Amino acid sequence: MNSSPPKPVLTAESLTVDRGGHQVLSGVEFSIAQGEIFALLGGNGAGKSTTLLTFLGFVTPTSGVARVNGQSVHEDIKAIHKQVAYLPEAANLYPHLNARENLDYFLSLAKADNSRARIDSALDMVGLAASARDRRLEAYSKGMRQKVGIALAILRDAPILLLDEPTSGLDPVAIDEFNSLVVALAGEGTTVLMVTHDVYGACQVARHIGLLQKGQMVGDFRASAGNPISADEVHRKFTESHL
Amino acid sequence: MGNLALEVRYALRERVVIASLVLAFAMASYAVITGKLEVDEQRSEISTLVRETESDQDHVLGQQPDAGGAAYYVHHVTYQPPSALAFAALGSRGELPWQHRVRMLALEGQIYETDAGNPALSRLGRLDFAFLTSVLLPLILILLLYDLDGRERRDGRYELLSATSASKGSPFFVKAGARTLLLFAASATPFAVMAAFVSAPLGPSLVVAAVVALHLCFWLVICRLVAVRFTQASSSATVLLAGWLLFSMAVPAAARIVVESSVPVPAGGELLLAQREAVNDAWDLPKADTMEPFVASHPEWRDHAEVTQPFEWKWYYAFQQMGDEFVASESAQLRAGITRRDNLMGVAALLSPPLATERWLTRLAATDRAHHQRYIQCVRGFHAALREFHYPMLFGASEYSPEKMAGLPKYQPCDE
């Protein structure tokens, strides 16, 4: 019996982005299968967030194509947005609203189920204390705000998660909880593209890591059956690429 | 619609939105209440004038031995009653005379007497509902919308909002629409309450609301176009304020200058002086110089036009009428000029939505130039009826008797 390789959900085909005469991305290629967690690693200014924004349709590539389930992102951005949940680096939700209201607002905007029970269940999953849920976000720490953002990404119930530095600002316990959550979601078939500069965090969750340096892919690491990606190896490559 | 309701609900949680709505509501309430008080005062003045004039007429007529005295000493009040919607747009009622006390003398001077020095002309504009909606509301809307996108960008929500929204249109357009809707509600509610309170007709009241809504929609579109083009809040605010100045101030002012210079109109004050000189000169002229042209233009009095005494009332009223006819062509030019200027300003309003809004509101409130012109024509019609009533007795075609004065024409507003 032949087993064909899984159809890629997210594909970057020679993505090149120029901005103000400067090449932000240069021929970036990767593909992510359904249920796969792909971590795009890189230092500041490597082009990680630009790659992610290209998949959201907010950055138009100078050449190359970003595809979601085979469809070019720029053909129908709204159709792409329906399949994607996005968590920005700093999940600055509305500071004058509390956690429940923020989630209610964004879920209504997404025309998703915004029942209180569902919202509370997601907030339980991300570990936001019940006593904090009715407080305005302006009184939250960065980590607490990030948890609400993560809850929103979960509640979107989208088949694809695009995460921009998702663990930034979280304490180690919350990072572990978040990583477990992402792994669980991937186990249920969610495809994850996560950009981060946290090498060890990425190796903990991702089965596939791309290393981006000055807009170019300089490393590609895959976990083999039973063996996770070696954080030391990735770290060495990461460090070398910055020398 | 669902998203609009959502945006309305959550916009009401923002302090700047609440503050803007309170400001708009307070100004609209002030505008309609002061408008109503002004209209009440005008109604009260009209009713006092009518009552006092009737009483004065009874008193004066009882003392007159002849037709000439009865015509000469009796004053008549003419007035343009405010419409039910006048509280919303005072328009010409704030700057042009809406009541006159006329006598059987030459009319043109009596009509334009106030043009020689009307203190209302030097008064600053009023904050009526028309001014609020045409000039001030756009400023509040700009305040609400100029930084809508910029703030979301600065706070890092722009992409999240765009990526989360499942609607076909831009979520920022819906956000802006919700704020516009709230501003409309805040400003239109005091108007609606007052319109209901004064039992204003529903149709025109709804049209007023529609005009306000359309004007706000124009500024909503402008704000969105600018927000898409200029991402910096300061740039967006500068461009929008420049647009507001252009549409609300520059275009109307420039249009007024162009229209007034391209359509010369005789001044009412000059017309008054010309007519008075014509009347005064008649005292020193041979009576035939008055009566012959009078009979030529009013042949029905040919058989009664002979003047044998040094003073006869019919001669006196004939030269009064000839005074009117002396300036008839200037008066017609003045009316035509005002109408032409008004029509041209209507064309200019196509370039200035605030001006168009103000014109629509004054038209609906019957306080525009056209309604004022109709009132002036109504005064002319009434004065003509007075002459028709008095002339048979003045020219001796019928006998004067105090009882006949019961049939003295009473002024009826033409718009009612």
Image (cartoon, rainbow, N blue to C red):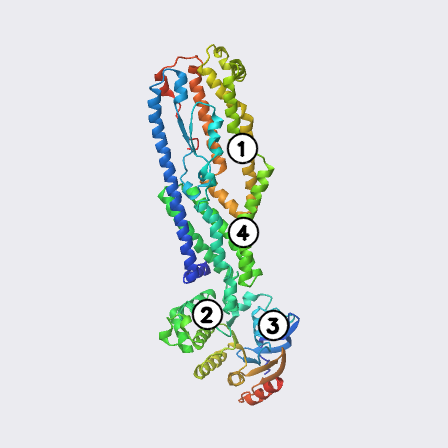
> In the image, what residue occupies the spot 51% across and 76% down?
A190
Q: Which residue is mark 1?
A: B267
Q: Earlier in the sequence, mark 4 or mark 1?
A: 4
Kindly indicate whether the residue at mark 2 contacts the one at mark 4 (C-beta within 8 angstroms): no
In depth, the one of B410 and A174 nearer the eye is B410
Q: What amino acid is labelled 2 in the image? A: Leu
Report which residue position mark 3 lands on: A66
Q: Position of residue B138 (x, y in %)?
A: 49, 52
Q: Amino acid at mark 3?
A: Ala
Vertical side of A214 occupied by B216: above or below: above
User: Dot 2 lies on which element?
Assistant: loop
**How far apart in space, not on screen, are marks 2 and 1 (Cα)?**
64 Å
Q: Secondary structure at mark 3?
A: strand
Q: Identify the residue at horizontal 56%, vertical 82% (top origin).
A: A208
Look at label 1 and name its amino acid: Ala
Q: Marks 3 and 2: in contact by CB < 8 Å?
A: no
Which numbered tag is attached to residue B245?
Answer: 4
Do discs 2 and 1 belong to a common subunit?
Answer: no
Q: Nearer the viewer, residue B78 or B217?
A: B78
Judge from the rendering whether residue B221 lies leftward or rightward of residue B411; answer left or right.
Answer: right
State which chain disc 4 sits on: B
- Pointers 4 and 2 within a single chain: no
Q: Chain of mark 1?
A: B
Percent of width and height locating residue B150: 52, 64
Q: Nearer the viewer, mark 4 or mark 1?
A: 1
Disc 1 secondary structure class: loop
Amino acid type of disc 4? Answer: Leu
Front-most of A132 and A70? A132
